[in-house]
Image (cartoon, rainbow, N blue to C red):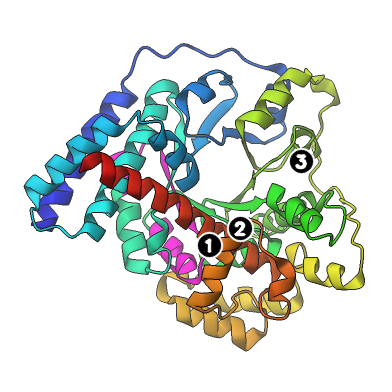
Amino acid sequence: MARSRTAQTDERLREAALEALNNTDRVAPASDPALAKLSALGTRLWLDTGNLEEAASLWKAEFTALTTNNTLANQVVQTGVLDDVARQALREIKAADPGISDTDLVMELGFVINCHVALRLVRAFGAFVSVELHPSIGLDIEKTVAFAKRYHAVCPERFIIKIPLTPEGYCAVARVCGEGIPVNYTLGFSARQNYIAALMSRPTYVNVFLGRLNAVVADHKLGDGKNVGEKATMATQVALRDLRKAGRTETLLIAASMRAAPQVADLAGVDVFTMPPRVAKDFLAAGHDPDVLSSQVGREFEVAMYTSEASEITRCLWEIAPEVEKLGQAVEGRGAEMTGDDLRQADADFGTGLFAPLTPEDLAVIRTDGKIPVVARWAGKASLDDLMTQAALQSFAVDQAALDDRLMRVSA
């Protein structure tokens, strides 16, 4: 029965995808000279929003993709624009599988709604769209692979699958990419995380959420917070560039979580920008002279830390230590044959400290603290990049719970 139910759902979504792809009512967007220069420098330009109306007000010819996530999808769902879609989906799912559990039901509703959020964007812009998996399956390789395949089958022409950075994620990404499915391996915060991902899993894209790095340093008075995310981003870009030159990966970097328009010019030449609407709006309004924009790849960003302890805490964001290189060699190309526990053991064996042994109680505390964790609380227990990833995962879980609750209430 479950096979029939998912097949029916996916077939209907595929029909909606084909309709979106064939939309002939799109208006050709205008070009922007500054964005055109960034594209010429090698930077792909994406918007970081699931809100169609917000994106439409900013869309230029140089934009090629949009990113959605649990938070952004929740913002769209809470407006009520997809309430009728949720009700119809519930009726169809329950008709096909009357005994479906609430857990499976909310997963299926979330799948349908995320697809519709993304397909509205495909219809409007003909763009690529990153769609994110439900955070509850972040430690389940088989479910991650299964849902990644389902999302891709809905719209292989435009969907990029976002998979969160976990030990199981490294393994699942390798399996998914091995089948030719494009993956945005999200919630990365350091060069070393992405170095291992590029070698072990070879995703299409990895990320540095740079704005949050500046925020965590400033908020906890480790330093002034300036250029922390930029430095981690550029270190990752250089590392990936070198790996690509050596033929060891084809992975591209996304500079994500931008907070201010100047970061756009400061990071020109990075593989991909995914700009929040406010950043894109401010950059466009600034009217940059295209001739002034130049590639910044390889730029040395200076950061000011207030203490030697703060410098030690943040060093993992941009340094790829010898033990990380050795771990990379050990797992290179092996992601599809490994488990999350295999990677955790390798991390312990090489002493890289990528994955802290956090308990459910620890994760509950991180969830309460929000996107910016209380760094001092985890001194000696979790490295900053892993802590930031865990905080991002828990934050998405909170937003997903709000989304799930809305879907179940609307559909009842």
Of the 4 image quadrants, the one containing the N terminus is bottom left
- Write the residue at 43% across / 77% down: 339
Q: Is mark 3 on a helix, strand or loop?
A: loop
Q: In the picture shown, does residue 302 fall above or below 281?
A: below
| Residue 161 in sight from this viewpoint | yes
Magenta stretch, residue numbers: 151-178
- Write the residue at 62% across / 73% down: 328
Amino acid at pointer 3: Leu
Q: Is residue 175 left or right of residue 185?
A: left
| Pointer 3 local density, CA inside 10 Å: few below 14, some 14–19, many at least 20 | many
Q: Distance between the residues labelled 1 and 3?
A: 23 Å
Q: Marks 3 and 2: in contact by CB < 8 Å? A: no
Q: Name which quarter of the figure residue 216 lies in.
A: bottom right
Q: Is residue 317 left or right of residue 1?
A: right
Residue depth check, mark 1 versus mark 3: number of the one nearer the observer: 1
Q: Is residue 252 left or right of residue 52?
A: right
- Write the residue at 73% across / 39% down: 269
| Residue 197 in sight from this viewpoint | no
Q: In the picture shown, does residue 35 fall above or below 175?
A: above
Residue 138, horizontal then vertical, whole percent: 43, 64
* Viewer-closest of 314 and 34: 314
| Pointer 1 local density, CA inside 10 Å: few below 14, some 14–19, many at least 20 | many
Amino acid at pointer 2: Gly
Residue 311, horizontal then vertical, whole percent: 86, 68
Q: Mark 2 points at which residue?
A: 188
Q: Mark 3 points at which residue?
A: 267
Q: Earlier in the sequence, mark 2 or mark 1?
A: 1
